[in-house]
Image: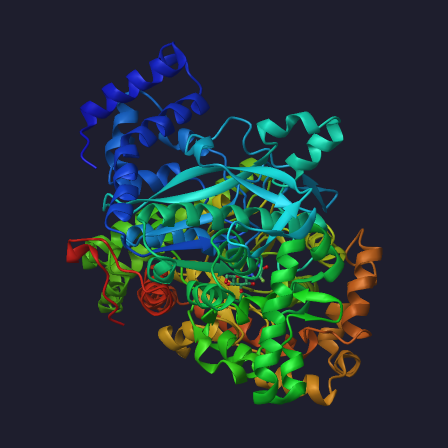
């Protein structure tokens, strides 16, 4: 976007006065932010409109990314960067006597997602627009996002996230594009004009789905795609039927709040309502769009791709069938062909407890016509496969079984592509978790290793590192992240290595200022910063990290003069409110922090910082300051992980199990540049199969570990009597499901290697540089390029080939 500083200052001041009718000098940061957001939205509205029109007029194929979560982070800076006016605006604001960083901070961070899955959706939206690909998001405009986390006496307390309190400058309400979503009622057959019997719905509850659109600004390419989030309202013409506040509330409830469960299925009706609500609304708006093209239904899959992000939107499959059958009068065979060709599905987990299944009665009652369609899909599936695969295999793939509708089965049968999110994950899907389906549909299965947007996670979060890289290898890496590998040429350049160290130190100082001001914890920026930031989940093994910290603590207490590498252990994690074990681990970490941080003898040698309310904005502060990246899940459990990629990109060294995308990180960065430990997934499988794992024996025979574990129950750590006992028992007596005791020794050993390496700053910085320079392949731009070419079959609309990406690993 062309904008001079002079013009910006004039126009922005004018916008402010038009909005508020007073002088900008007397305003608050939130008012300045609001005016600036509106100013920007006005400035790109023309490109937004043009992008939409171009897609329609040229009838290009578009993808619709259906996701029940989007976790975009603050948008002001990222929009400025992508519009190409970050520096102009920043300088202009300084001229106006305003504080840019204060303005940036006054934007709320929309928490419309839980963690990796939602953040991936937003990284993808950024890459889709930046590659000039015609793509749109489809999701829910939650009135309240993921809860705000507070610690009270070390316990997690959840507060509502009223993120819309001050409005939202980026969204545009489009009541003219509203559609009706129907729940409940009965299905009957009524004779249509052509004499055919047609399914007709009676006594349904009709909900108005109103879209709120947000522009997804591409990186300096004039492309503005659309993120459409739906809000539930009472249709004005139905107001008369709503007599009580409770009845009205039931409607608002649908889009009231995000379910705070990550990788865990809670089978509540309201969640099923949410799932149908946004998928039905999304399908209907796609259909409305498609009808404008005037093309025949057969061409639908040539113009539309619909991607199902995990199984939450998989009702899109029977919903598209329903529309094509009941409203557009297609035959089952035609509708099914179109649906399968249109839909594709990503699996994000192998955890059994995360697999969505809905009780038949619930689906029947809430979505009677959809249930009929699913039944017919299932009937035909079974009928077709029985003779080919026999009854055992075939019935194991049934969509309806054991009283439930199985959403993953529906998603696989009803789509043409099923992908995992890292090589190992996809292997496990094909050969283990989804092997029955892999035998039936080998060609559907493919891998798309996750990626992250380097624009937010390097360019914006770490401007000083960005400048250093620019000064060494130029700026082409910004549109072709593979070019980051050119940075390897500086592996022996002492000046570059020293600069890397200085930049890291400055970022650590910034974080230290945060912990001091916001948490009252003083940390030494010269200590090693060790970071584990992700949802609290037993399989991610934050507890293993804790055992290592306790081990260090005991060592220091035994010999307070010990020369040990000072470390700050940084945690950020929310636990699902109903996940009591995870909450007990939070309490444990906080209690341990209380003990260690206040122990004079320990002093700077050991500190624990557990940040409250971890989210995208805190990630942007922590990741650039990180030196060690903890990726320590039990092998075979973490589908991919994405914080591993962000931390690597910012120069942290990874300590990892061979799980998820860690495997590919190892392949790119080389074994010498990260610290591997623990069981691999084969070994885990064997131990699980032959039942030969006895953690109690390890406890009894490993004195060091025994001493560490005993601190959980012997009063060493104050105020965790209950939690300490539960955790201790889970590890020692209840089988240690995630093999912490088994991996303890090798984890400690890897940590000792880290301490040793850290003594040599040059060697450390060399490995840090190798990590930065090897992280290009994990750009979401590449991931999206593969989705676009191999699954969606959509093309970039950019004319200028220099703006297109070429994969040159
Ligand atoms: C997986 F199943 C789920 C879920 O409900 N939420 C979620 O964030 C994560 N995920 C995986 O746990 C990560 O390994 C992965 O990187 C991320 O999805 C994105 O694919």
User: From the image, which quarter does the N terminus lie in?
Assistant: top left
Q: Nearer the viewer, residue 737 or 740?
A: 737
Q: Is residue 484 above or below residue 254?
A: below
Left or right: 655 as drawn, with respect to 648: right
Against 539, residue 364 (above or below) is above
Residue shown at the point (48%, 56%) measured from the top left: 329
**Residue 348, image x, y percentages:** 54, 65
* Picture quarter with the C terminus: bottom left
- Quadrant location, ligand no. 1: bottom right
**As rendered, which of 707 and 346 lies closer to the eye?**
346
Q: Is residue 466 left or right of residue 432?
A: left
* Relative vertical location of residue 417 with respect to residue 230 in this rendering, above or below: below
The mark tally for this picture is 0
The residue lying furthest to the front in this view is: 195
Q: Is residue 733 visible?
A: yes
Q: Which residue is found at the position 34% from the left and 31% from the top? A: 41
User: How is the structure coloured here?
Assistant: rainbow
| Residue furthest top as drawn | 22
Residue nearest the viewer, comparing 697 with 451: 451
Residue 229 appears at what percent x and percent y? Answer: 49, 42
Q: Position of residue 254 (x, y in %)?
A: 64, 41
Left or right relative to 269: residue 420: left
Rendered residue at 42%/16% (across/down): 27
**Is residue 756 in sight in this rendering?**
no
Residue 717: x, y in percent?
Answer: 77, 56
């Amino acid at each position: 976007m062309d904008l001079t500083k002079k013009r910006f200052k004039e126009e922005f001041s004018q916008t402010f006065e038009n909005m508020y009718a007073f002088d900008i000098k007397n305003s608050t940061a939130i008012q300045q932010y609001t005016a600036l957001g509106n100013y920007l939205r006005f400035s790109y509205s023309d490109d937004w409109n043009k992008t939409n029109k171009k897609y329609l007029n040229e009838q290009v194929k578009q993808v619709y990314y259906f996701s029940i979560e989007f976790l975009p982070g603050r948008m002001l800076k990222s929009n400025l960067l992508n519009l190409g006016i970050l520096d102009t605006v920043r300088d202009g604001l300084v001229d106006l006597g305003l504080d840019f960083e204060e303005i940036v901070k006054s934007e709320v961070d929309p928490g419309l997602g839980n963690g990796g899955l939602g953040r991936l959706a937003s990284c993808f939206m950024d890459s889709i627009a930046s590659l000039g690909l015609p793509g749109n998001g489809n999701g829910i405009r939650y009135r309240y996002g993921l809860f705000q986390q507070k610690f009270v006496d070390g316990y997690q307390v959840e507060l509502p996230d009223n993120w819309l309190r001050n409005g939202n400058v980026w969204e545009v309400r489009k009541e003219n594009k509203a559609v009706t979503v129907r729940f409940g009622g009965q299905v009957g057959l009524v004779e249509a004009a052509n004499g055919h019997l047609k399914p007709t719905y009676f006594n349904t509850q009709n909900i108005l789905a109103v879209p709120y659109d947000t522009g997804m600004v591409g990186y300096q390419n004039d492309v503005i795609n659309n993120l459409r989030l739906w809000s539930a309202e009472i249709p004005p013409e139905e107001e008369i039927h709503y007599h009580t506040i409770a009845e009205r509330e039931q409607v608002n409830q649908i889009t009231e709040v995000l379910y705070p469960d990550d990788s865990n299925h809670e089978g509540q009706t309201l969640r099923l309502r949410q799932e149908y609500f946004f998928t039905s609304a999304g399908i209907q708006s796609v259909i409305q769009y498609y009808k404008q093209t005037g093309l025949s239904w057969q061409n639908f899959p040539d113009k539309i791709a619909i991607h199902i992000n995990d199984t939450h939107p998989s009702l899109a499959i029977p919903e598209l069938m329903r529309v094509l059958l009941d409203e557009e009068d297609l035959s089952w065979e035609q509708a099914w062909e179109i649906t399968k060709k249109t839909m594709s599905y990503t699996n994000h987990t192998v955890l059994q407890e995360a697999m969505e299944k809905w009780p038949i009665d619930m689906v029947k009652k809430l979505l009677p016509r959809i249930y009929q369609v699913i039944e017919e899909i299932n009937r035909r599936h079974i009928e077709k496969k029985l003779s080919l695969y026999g009854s055992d295999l075939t019935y194991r793939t049934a969509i309806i079984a054991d009283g439930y509708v199985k959403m993953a089965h529906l998603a696989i049968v009803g789509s043409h592509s099923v992908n995992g999110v890292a090589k190992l994950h996809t292997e496990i899907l094909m050969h283990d978790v989804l092997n029955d389906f892999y035998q039936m549909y080998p060609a559907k299965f493919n891998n798309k290793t996750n990626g992250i947007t380097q624009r937010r996670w390097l360019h914006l979060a770490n401007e000083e590192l960005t400048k250093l890289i620019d000064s060494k290898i130029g700026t082409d890496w910004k549109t072709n992240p593979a070019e980051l590998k050119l940075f390897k040429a500086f592996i022996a350049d002492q000046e570059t290595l020293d600069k890397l160290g200085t930049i890291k130190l400055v970022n650590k100082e910034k974080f230290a200022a945060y912990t001091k001001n916001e948490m009252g914890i003083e940390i030494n920026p010269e200590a090693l910063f060790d970071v584990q930031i992700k949802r609290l989940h037993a399989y991610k093994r934050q507890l293993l990290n804790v055992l290592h910290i306790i081990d260090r603590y005991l060592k220091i207490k035994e010999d307070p003069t010990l020369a040990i590498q000072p470390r700050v252990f940084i945690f950020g994690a929310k636990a699902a409110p109903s996940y009591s074990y995870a909450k007990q681990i939070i309490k444990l970490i906080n209690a341990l922090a209380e003990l260690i941080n206040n122990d004079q003898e320990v002093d700077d040698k050991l500190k624990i910082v557990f940040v409250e309310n971890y989210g995208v904005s805190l990630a942007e502060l922590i990741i650039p300051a990180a030196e060690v990246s903890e990726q320590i899940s039990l092998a075979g459990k973490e589908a991919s992980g994405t914080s591993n990629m962000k931390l690597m990109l910012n120069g942290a060294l990874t300590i990892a199990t061979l799980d998820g995308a860690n495997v590919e990180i190892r392949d790119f960065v080389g074994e010498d540049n990260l610290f591997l430990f623990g069981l691999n997934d084969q070994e885990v499988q064997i131990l699980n199969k032959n039942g030969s794992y006895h953690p109690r024996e390890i406890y009894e025979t490993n004195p060091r570990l025994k001493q560490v574990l005993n601190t959980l129950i012997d009063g060493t750590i104050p105020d965790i009597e209950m939690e300490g006992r539960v955790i201790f028992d889970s590890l020692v007596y209840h089988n240690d499901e995630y093999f912490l005791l088994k991996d303890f020794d090798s984890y400690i050993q890897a940590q000792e290697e880290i301490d040793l390496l850290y003594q040599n700053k040059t060697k450390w910085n060399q490995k840090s540089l190798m990590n930065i320079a090897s992280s290009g392949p994990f750009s979401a731009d590449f991931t999206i390029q593969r989705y676009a070419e191999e699954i969606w079959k959509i093309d970039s609309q950019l004319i200028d080939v220099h703006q297109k990406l070429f994969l040159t690993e």
